[in-house]
């Protein structure tokens, strides 16, 4: 066997070992994630479609309607982070350019922090409600 043939054989074997190790790591990670990963995937799929569901503005908590009023007036807002860019990293809202969406806190009575409720705005008249810190969204219908 020439040294070139040996080198090629070793390279092929090494590539096979790396491929098997990578496959084993992926399978092991998937199996160890178990039901939690499955429920996260289900929640993600549900959240992706939830943005198309609608909620009547009149059915929102009074604090959410107060936040919508502040947004319409341009503030002042109760939290300094209100109005910051919402990046939509999870892709649960329709894909738009960076800086398109903005988030606003909906006050949660009894919460010692900002809580989990938000209104996210896009273009004119485009408003979304989430009460679970961006896991699901509903389009706010202002006409009901």
Image (cartoon, rainbow, N blue to C red):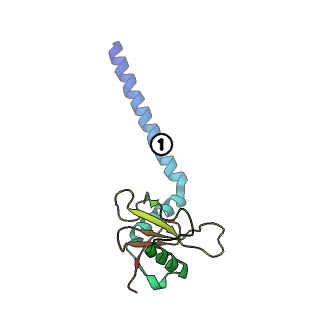
Q: Is residue 25 above or below residue 133?
A: above
Q: Which residue is located at x 41 percent, y 73 percent? A: 127
Q: Which residue is mark 1?
A: 24
Give the quarter of the figure containing the N terminus.
top left
Residue 76 percent across, percent down from the top left: 52, 70
Quarter-of-image position of residue 85: bottom left
Residue 105 against residue 84 in the figure, above or below = below
Q: Position of residue 61 (x, y in %)?
A: 53, 81
The total number of labels drawn is: 1
User: Which quadrant of the figure has residue 2?
Assistant: top left
In the displayed structure, does residue 139 sit left or right of residue 111?
left
Q: What residue lies at 48% left-to-right and 61% top-to-bottom?
A: 84
Point 46% across, 85% down: residue: 58
Question: Against 52, is 87 above or below?
Answer: above
Q: Residues within 10 Å of mark 1 (few under 14, many from 20)?
A: few
User: Is the C terminus in the top left, top right, bottom left or bottom right quadrant?
Assistant: bottom left
Image spot of residue 44 (x, y percent) = 45, 63
Compared with 88, 68 (above or below) is: below
| In-front residue for pair 61/77 | 77
Left or right of residue 107, residue 21 in this image: left
Where residue 113 appears, as percent x and y from the top left, is: 63, 66
Name the residue furthest top.
2
Q: Secondary structure at mark 1?
A: helix
């Amino acid at each position: 066997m020439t040294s070139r043939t040996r080198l090629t054989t070793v390279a092929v074997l090494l590539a096979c070992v790396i491929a098997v190790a990578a496959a084993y790591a992926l399978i092991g990670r998937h199996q160890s994630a178990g039901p939690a990963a499955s429920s996260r995937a289900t929640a993600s799929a549900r959240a992706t479609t939830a943005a198309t569901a609608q909620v009547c503005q009149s059915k929102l908590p009074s604090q959410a309607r107060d936040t919508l009023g502040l947004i319409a007036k341009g503030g002042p807002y109760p939290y300094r982070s209100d109005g910051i860019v919402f990046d939509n990293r999870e892709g649960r809202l329709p894909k738009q350019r960076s800086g398109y969406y903005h988030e606003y806190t909906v006050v949660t009575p009894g919460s010692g922090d900002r809580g989990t409720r938000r209104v996210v705005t896009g273009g004119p008249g485009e408003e979304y409600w989430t009460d679970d810190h961006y896991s699901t969204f509903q389009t706010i219908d202002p006409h009901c």
